[in-house]
Image: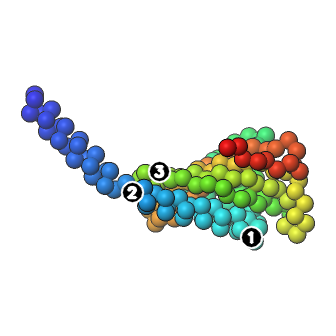
Amino acid sequence: MRLLTGITLAVSLSASSLLGACSGSAATQAAEAQRLLQTDRAFAAASLEQGTAAAFFANMTEDALQLPANAAPVKGRKRIRDRLDSLGAQVLDWTPQQAEVSRALDFGWTWGEWRLYRSAASKEVIARGKYLNVWRRGADGAWKLAADIGNQAEDPTQQSAPSS
């Protein structure tokens, strides 16, 4: 029994060591967080250039979840695109503030502030809020949006200041 326990412990420790070695170092993790932040910034730029629905469709996982402010959850990439198509000429823009990634480098999150413009040309803000996005890294190394979570400010003209 003790031999079996010792073997089990040795196998467990070896597996832990291997998994730890596969995980990113702090420097790798920080670099990947910066890459994720850049991915979110490019995603925001695509929303202005290509339209919100097209940008989301291109950047989401098939099983993505959207938790919009003051609305029911939307599950699935195609359903999210259809919901965003209903914005018409309105366009969503956002400013990513921070990104973090897991030690395994396979999940991450970003947060920032969003604005909904009456149109891309007018830049008239009709709604604003904050968001938290959860990202999944694919086998190809590309980050895809798995969950989009947002809230909405009561006054669309009021910008929030980060607390320290």
Task: Measure the C-alpha gap from mark 2 to mark 1.
Answer: 36 Å
**In front: label 2 or label 1:** 2
Q: Which residue lies at the image location 28% right of the left edge and 46% below the top edge?
A: 16
- The residue labelled by disc 3 is 102
User: Can residue 57 be seen here?
Assistant: no
Type of the residue with mark 2 = Ser
Q: Which residue lies at the image location 33% right of the left edge and 56% below the top edge?
A: 22
- The residue labelled by disc 2 is 25
Type of the residue with mark 3 = Ser
Looking at marks 1 and 3 on the same chain, the residue that comes earlier in the sequence is marked by: 1
Quadrant assignment for the N terminus: top left
CB atoms of marks 2 and 1 within 8 Å? no
Q: Secondary structure at mark 3?
A: loop
**In front: label 1 or label 3:** 3
Q: Residue 66 location, x and y as percent?
A: 67, 48
Q: Which disc number belongs to residue 119?
A: none
**Residue 129 as seen in the image, left or right of residue 56:** right
Task: Measure the C-alpha gap from mark 1 to mark 3.
Answer: 30 Å
